[in-house]
Protein backbone atom coordinates (compact mmCIF):
# COMPACT_ATOMS: atom_id res chain seq x y z
CA UNK A 1 0.00 0.00 0.00
CA UNK A 2 1.31 3.41 -1.01
CA UNK A 3 1.67 5.52 2.06
CA UNK A 4 3.51 8.17 4.02
CA UNK A 5 4.21 7.29 7.63
CA UNK A 6 5.18 9.55 10.50
CA UNK A 7 6.42 8.81 13.97
CA UNK A 8 5.57 9.54 16.64
CA UNK A 9 1.92 10.41 16.15
CA UNK A 10 1.75 12.26 19.45
CA UNK A 11 4.53 13.84 21.45
CA UNK A 12 4.71 15.94 24.60
CA UNK A 13 8.07 17.46 25.37
CA UNK A 14 9.65 20.34 27.25
CA UNK A 15 11.31 23.47 26.01
CA UNK A 16 14.84 22.91 24.77
CA UNK A 17 14.78 19.13 24.55
CA UNK A 18 15.83 18.11 21.06
CA UNK A 19 13.42 15.93 19.15
CA UNK A 20 13.06 14.31 15.76
CA UNK A 21 9.89 13.43 13.89
CA UNK A 22 10.47 10.79 11.29
CA UNK A 23 8.79 10.59 7.89
CA UNK A 24 9.01 7.77 5.43
CA UNK A 25 7.36 7.11 2.06
CA UNK A 26 7.29 3.90 0.06
CA UNK A 27 6.42 5.38 -3.34
CA UNK A 28 9.95 6.27 -4.48
CA UNK A 29 8.90 9.92 -4.58
CA UNK A 30 11.53 12.55 -5.17
CA UNK A 31 9.73 15.50 -3.62
CA UNK A 32 8.95 15.64 0.09
CA UNK A 33 7.72 18.41 2.36
CA UNK A 34 7.00 19.21 5.96
CA UNK A 35 4.03 21.36 6.93
CA UNK A 36 2.61 22.63 10.16
CA UNK A 37 -1.10 23.17 10.60
CA UNK A 38 -2.38 25.71 13.09
CA UNK A 39 -5.94 26.91 13.75
CA UNK A 40 -6.79 29.89 11.59
CA UNK A 41 -3.52 29.64 9.66
CA UNK A 42 -3.97 26.51 7.58
CA UNK A 43 -1.06 24.47 6.27
CA UNK A 44 2.27 26.23 6.07
CA UNK A 45 5.34 24.70 4.52
CA UNK A 46 8.37 24.39 6.78
CA UNK A 47 10.96 22.74 4.55
CA UNK A 48 10.98 20.76 1.37
CA UNK A 49 13.33 18.46 -0.47
CA UNK A 50 13.49 17.91 -4.20
CA UNK A 51 15.75 14.89 -3.96
CA UNK A 52 18.43 13.24 -1.87
CA UNK A 53 20.75 15.81 -0.29
CA UNK A 54 18.66 18.67 -1.75
CA UNK A 55 16.62 20.63 0.78
CA UNK A 56 15.30 24.15 0.96
CA UNK A 57 13.37 26.43 3.27
CA UNK A 58 9.64 26.80 3.01
CA UNK A 59 7.58 29.60 4.47
CA UNK A 60 8.23 29.00 8.18
CA UNK A 61 11.64 27.32 8.58
CA UNK A 62 12.81 29.04 11.76
CA UNK A 63 13.56 26.60 14.56
CA UNK A 64 13.53 23.54 12.32
CA UNK A 65 16.08 21.43 10.47
CA UNK A 66 15.67 18.61 7.99
CA UNK A 67 17.85 16.08 6.28
CA UNK A 68 17.45 13.90 3.21
CA UNK A 69 20.14 11.26 3.26
CA UNK A 70 18.02 8.71 1.47
CA UNK A 71 15.05 9.02 -0.82
CA UNK A 72 12.42 7.45 1.38
CA UNK A 73 13.12 9.34 4.61
CA UNK A 74 12.79 13.01 5.48
CA UNK A 75 13.10 13.62 9.23
CA UNK A 76 12.14 16.91 10.85
CA UNK A 77 14.44 18.01 13.64
CA UNK A 78 13.70 20.52 16.37
CA UNK A 79 17.05 21.26 18.00
CA UNK A 80 15.60 23.35 20.81
CA UNK A 81 11.80 23.21 20.78
CA UNK A 82 9.80 26.16 22.06
CA UNK A 83 6.11 26.44 22.98
CA UNK A 84 5.33 28.27 19.72
CA UNK A 85 6.24 25.08 17.91
CA UNK A 86 3.27 23.34 19.46
CA UNK A 87 1.35 22.32 16.38
CA UNK A 88 0.14 19.52 14.12
CA UNK A 89 2.82 18.48 11.68
CA UNK A 90 2.35 16.77 8.34
CA UNK A 91 4.86 15.18 6.05
CA UNK A 92 3.95 14.91 2.38
CA UNK A 93 5.47 13.50 -0.76
CA UNK A 94 4.89 13.56 -4.49
CA UNK A 95 6.67 12.09 -7.46
CA UNK A 96 8.33 15.33 -8.55
CA UNK A 97 8.00 19.02 -7.87
CA UNK A 98 5.44 19.69 -10.58
CA UNK A 99 3.51 16.48 -10.16
CA UNK A 100 0.27 17.42 -8.61
CA UNK A 101 -0.97 14.61 -6.44
CA UNK A 102 0.59 15.01 -3.04
CA UNK A 103 0.26 12.31 -0.42
CA UNK A 104 0.13 13.34 3.21
CA UNK A 105 1.12 11.42 6.28
CA UNK A 106 -1.30 10.97 9.21
CA UNK A 107 0.16 13.84 11.20
CA UNK A 108 2.18 14.29 14.39
CA UNK A 109 0.65 16.31 17.17
CA UNK A 110 3.37 18.04 19.18
CA UNK A 111 2.98 19.83 22.49
CA UNK A 112 5.96 21.76 23.82
CA UNK A 113 5.64 22.74 27.45
CA UNK B 1 -0.18 39.42 -0.46
CA UNK B 2 -1.06 36.18 -2.18
CA UNK B 3 -3.60 34.17 -0.26
CA UNK B 4 -6.19 31.49 -0.59
CA UNK B 5 -9.20 31.69 1.63
CA UNK B 6 -12.60 30.23 2.25
CA UNK B 7 -15.80 32.22 2.68
CA UNK B 8 -17.34 30.18 5.52
CA UNK B 9 -15.54 28.40 8.34
CA UNK B 10 -18.45 25.99 8.96
CA UNK B 11 -21.12 24.65 6.63
CA UNK B 12 -24.03 22.52 7.83
CA UNK B 13 -25.86 20.45 5.23
CA UNK B 14 -28.75 18.02 5.46
CA UNK B 15 -27.81 14.47 4.60
CA UNK B 16 -28.75 13.82 0.98
CA UNK B 17 -28.58 17.46 -0.06
CA UNK B 18 -25.84 18.92 -2.21
CA UNK B 19 -22.97 20.78 -0.56
CA UNK B 20 -21.18 23.76 -2.04
CA UNK B 21 -17.91 24.88 -0.52
CA UNK B 22 -16.38 28.10 -1.78
CA UNK B 23 -12.86 29.39 -2.05
CA UNK B 24 -11.41 32.72 -3.13
CA UNK B 25 -7.89 33.12 -4.41
CA UNK B 26 -5.92 36.24 -5.11
CA UNK B 27 -3.03 35.14 -7.34
CA UNK B 28 -4.14 35.47 -10.95
CA UNK B 29 -0.96 33.66 -12.04
CA UNK B 30 -1.98 30.43 -10.32
CA UNK B 31 -2.40 27.71 -12.93
CA UNK B 32 -3.58 24.79 -10.89
CA UNK B 33 -6.06 24.30 -8.07
CA UNK B 34 -6.70 21.41 -5.73
CA UNK B 35 -9.35 20.47 -3.22
CA UNK B 36 -8.40 18.41 -0.17
CA UNK B 37 -10.51 16.64 2.42
CA UNK B 38 -9.21 16.26 5.95
CA UNK B 39 -11.03 13.97 8.31
CA UNK B 40 -10.52 14.20 12.04
CA UNK B 41 -7.17 12.75 13.07
CA UNK B 42 -5.97 12.23 9.52
CA UNK B 43 -3.84 13.97 6.98
CA UNK B 44 -5.29 15.87 4.01
CA UNK B 45 -6.51 13.69 1.18
CA UNK B 46 -6.63 14.75 -2.47
CA UNK B 47 -10.18 14.98 -3.82
CA UNK B 48 -10.08 16.69 -7.19
CA UNK B 49 -8.03 19.20 -9.11
CA UNK B 50 -8.50 21.61 -11.99
CA UNK B 51 -6.15 23.49 -14.26
CA UNK B 52 -6.61 27.13 -15.10
CA UNK B 53 -7.50 26.36 -18.71
CA UNK B 54 -10.67 24.62 -17.53
CA UNK B 55 -13.76 25.96 -15.80
CA UNK B 56 -15.33 22.71 -14.65
CA UNK B 57 -14.21 19.24 -13.76
CA UNK B 58 -16.26 16.35 -12.47
CA UNK B 59 -15.33 13.38 -10.38
CA UNK B 60 -17.34 10.82 -8.53
CA UNK B 61 -20.03 12.86 -6.72
CA UNK B 62 -17.79 15.91 -6.74
CA UNK B 63 -17.50 18.80 -9.15
CA UNK B 64 -15.03 21.65 -9.07
CA UNK B 65 -15.87 24.95 -10.72
CA UNK B 66 -13.32 27.63 -11.51
CA UNK B 67 -14.24 31.21 -12.28
CA UNK B 68 -11.07 33.02 -13.18
CA UNK B 69 -12.85 36.32 -13.75
CA UNK B 70 -13.68 36.66 -10.06
CA UNK B 71 -10.92 34.31 -8.83
CA UNK B 72 -13.37 31.92 -7.28
CA UNK B 73 -13.23 28.17 -6.85
CA UNK B 74 -15.99 25.93 -5.57
CA UNK B 75 -16.40 22.30 -4.64
CA UNK B 76 -19.79 20.72 -5.08
CA UNK B 77 -20.59 17.43 -3.38
CA UNK B 78 -23.71 15.69 -4.60
CA UNK B 79 -26.00 13.80 -2.23
CA UNK B 80 -23.94 14.54 0.84
CA UNK B 81 -23.32 11.55 3.08
CA UNK B 82 -22.21 11.26 6.73
CA UNK B 83 -18.79 10.16 5.49
CA UNK B 84 -18.36 13.54 3.83
CA UNK B 85 -18.08 15.18 7.22
CA UNK B 86 -14.61 16.73 7.27
CA UNK B 87 -12.66 19.92 6.79
CA UNK B 88 -12.27 20.85 3.15
CA UNK B 89 -9.65 23.23 1.89
CA UNK B 90 -8.51 24.46 -1.42
CA UNK B 91 -4.99 25.05 -2.59
CA UNK B 92 -3.55 27.00 -5.48
CA UNK B 93 -0.26 26.65 -7.26
CA UNK B 94 1.82 29.29 -8.94
CA UNK B 95 5.45 28.80 -8.08
CA UNK B 96 4.47 26.96 -4.93
CA UNK B 97 1.34 25.51 -3.40
CA UNK B 98 -0.61 27.76 -1.04
CA UNK B 99 -3.31 26.22 1.12
CA UNK B 100 -6.52 27.82 2.27
CA UNK B 101 -7.61 27.70 5.88
CA UNK B 102 -10.46 25.25 5.51
CA UNK B 103 -14.23 24.91 5.85
CA UNK B 104 -15.72 22.36 8.18
CA UNK B 105 -18.61 20.46 6.59
CA UNK B 106 -21.14 19.25 9.13
CA UNK B 107 -23.80 16.77 8.05
CA UNK B 108 -27.21 17.02 9.65
CA UNK B 109 -29.18 13.77 10.02
Image (cartoon, rainbow, N blue to C red):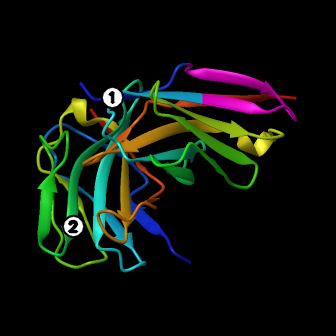
Label 1 sits on a secondary structure element that is loop
Q: Which residues are magenta?
A: B8-21
The residue shown at (51%, 37%) is B89
Q: Which residue is mark 1?
A: B3
Using the rendered image of the protein, determine whether residue A69 is visible from the camera's viewpoint.
Answer: yes
A110 falls in the magenta region: no
Q: Quadrant of residue A77?
A: bottom left
Tell me the subunit letter for badge 2: A
Residues flagged by tags 1 and 2 on a common chain: no
Queried whether the magenta region covers residue B12, the answer comes back as yes
Residue B85 visible in the snapshot: no
Badge 1: chain ID? B
Q: Position of residue B52 (x, y in %)?
A: 44, 46
- The one nearer the camera, A22 or A14, is A22
Up the image or down, A38 lies above or below A11; here it is above
The residue where tag 2 is placed is A50
Image side of residue A59 versus residue B8, left or right = left
Q: Residue at left 42%, top 78%?
A: A26
> Residue A113: x, y in percent?
27, 32
Amino acid sequence: EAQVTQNPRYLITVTGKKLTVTCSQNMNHEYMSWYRQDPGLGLRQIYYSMNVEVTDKGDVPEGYKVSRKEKRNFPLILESPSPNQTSLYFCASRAERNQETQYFGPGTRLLVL
Amino acid sequence: GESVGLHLPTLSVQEGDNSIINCAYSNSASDYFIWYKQESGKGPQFIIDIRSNMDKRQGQRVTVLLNKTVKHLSLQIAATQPGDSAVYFCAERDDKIIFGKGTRLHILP
